Amino acid sequence: GNSASFPGKMAARDFMDWLAAHESQLEHADEKTLQNLRIAHLQESGLVRLPPEIRNLQHTTMLLLYKNKLTCLRPEIGLLSRLEFINLDWNLLESLPASIGNLRRLKTLRLRNNRLCSLPNEIGDLQSLEHLRMADNSLTSLPSTLSRLSRLKELNIYRNKFRSLEGKIFRHLVNLEVLDVAGNHLSVLPPEIALLKKLKKFHRQSNPWLNPKETLQSDIPTLLDALGGGPARRAKQSEIVQRRRRLVAFACSVAAFAMGVNFLVRALGRGRNDPGNTEKRRGSAT
């Protein structure tokens, strides 16, 4: 069951959870065997292209293709309707086929360290997508259709070539918890990020910010609040701020009281030391 080859009469159930195969083995695999695979292990296989037989992975939920030499994906990948997880990290991909939008069950799409310059509009059709990782590419913009990914929890565009981010994209990403825009060429951030009420982690270092205040374009308090974490953390921060304000107010009142007492003491002291007052006291004594 752990061999990388395909014994002709091996039961399909033995292939349900794994497959370690190179391109030639995939091409010569039994069609029925491929149709029953749940996890397709094709990572580090030296693949430069996907064979047409990829369309037979009808029941595959996890497709591992990282660390190959793929420059493109066959349109047939859009036929793998049960896919929930694809790892395409460390390839040479320059684009994605429009058919990728047909993967309506896909929850995780990993594309780190490729050569992507753009994404197809159809990526907005991935209605189940929760994790989109695209670090170390050459992306300069995101398609506006990305705003339709209302279930997205993680968006990672670390070390790309973004000079700006389109604010309206973030308006409907109401479930976003992790946003990584570090290592780009950003000088400002769109205020719509302030609407991300579930945001817990926001990585934004290594960008040429013009000015910390200018970075946030508008609505600075709200955005800073959003960057602080989830509702519980923000509530705690708000409580801390209120406590600090009360402490400052108390300190000010104490300081004012002390100043008043000090002024009164000095006034009384001056009264005792006044020569006129001394003569008056002597006169009254005689």
Image (spheres, rainbow, N blue to C red):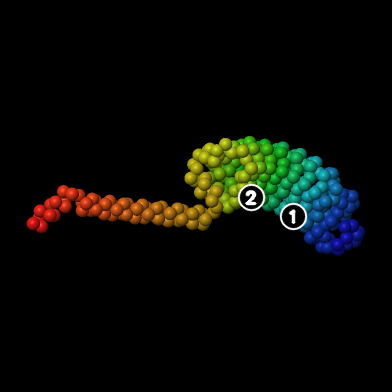
Per the rendering, the mark at residue 166 is none
Residue bearing mark 2: 154
Q: Residue 188's spot in the image, x, y percent?
A: 57, 38
Q: Residue at x 42, y 56 (%)?
A: 243
25 or 153, which lies in front?
153
Q: Residue 179's spot in the image, x, y percent?
A: 62, 47
- Give the quadrant of the N terminus: bottom right
- Give the quadrant of the C terminus: bottom left
| Quadrant in the picture for residue 187 | top right
Q: Residue at x 60, y 51 (%)?
A: 201
| Quadrant in the picture for residue 168 | top right
Earlier sequence position, callout 1 versus callout 2: 1
Q: Is residue 145 left or right of residue 269?
A: right
Whether residue 160 is situated above or below residue 34 in the rendered picture = above
Q: Residue at x 68, y 52 (%)?
A: 107
Q: Is residue 110 left or right of residue 278?
A: right
Q: Is residue 135 at least partly visible in the picture?
A: yes
Per the rendering, the mark at residue 61 is 1
| Quadrant in the picture for residue 61 | bottom right
Whether residue 13 is situated above or below residue 23 in the rendered picture = below
Estimate the spatial distance between the alpha carbons at disc 1 and disc 2, rounded to whole Å.
Answer: 20 Å
78 or 142, which lies in front?
142
At mark 1, the secondary structure is: loop
Is the residue marked by circle 1 packed among few (<14), some (14-19), or many (20+) residues within 10 Å? many
Q: Is residue 245 left or right of residue 195?
A: left
Q: Is residue 253 at least partly visible in the picture?
A: no
At mark 2, the secondary structure is: strand
**Mark 1 or mark 2, whichever is nearer to me:** 2
Identify residue type, mark 1: Thr
Q: Residue at x 70, y 45 (%)?
A: 135
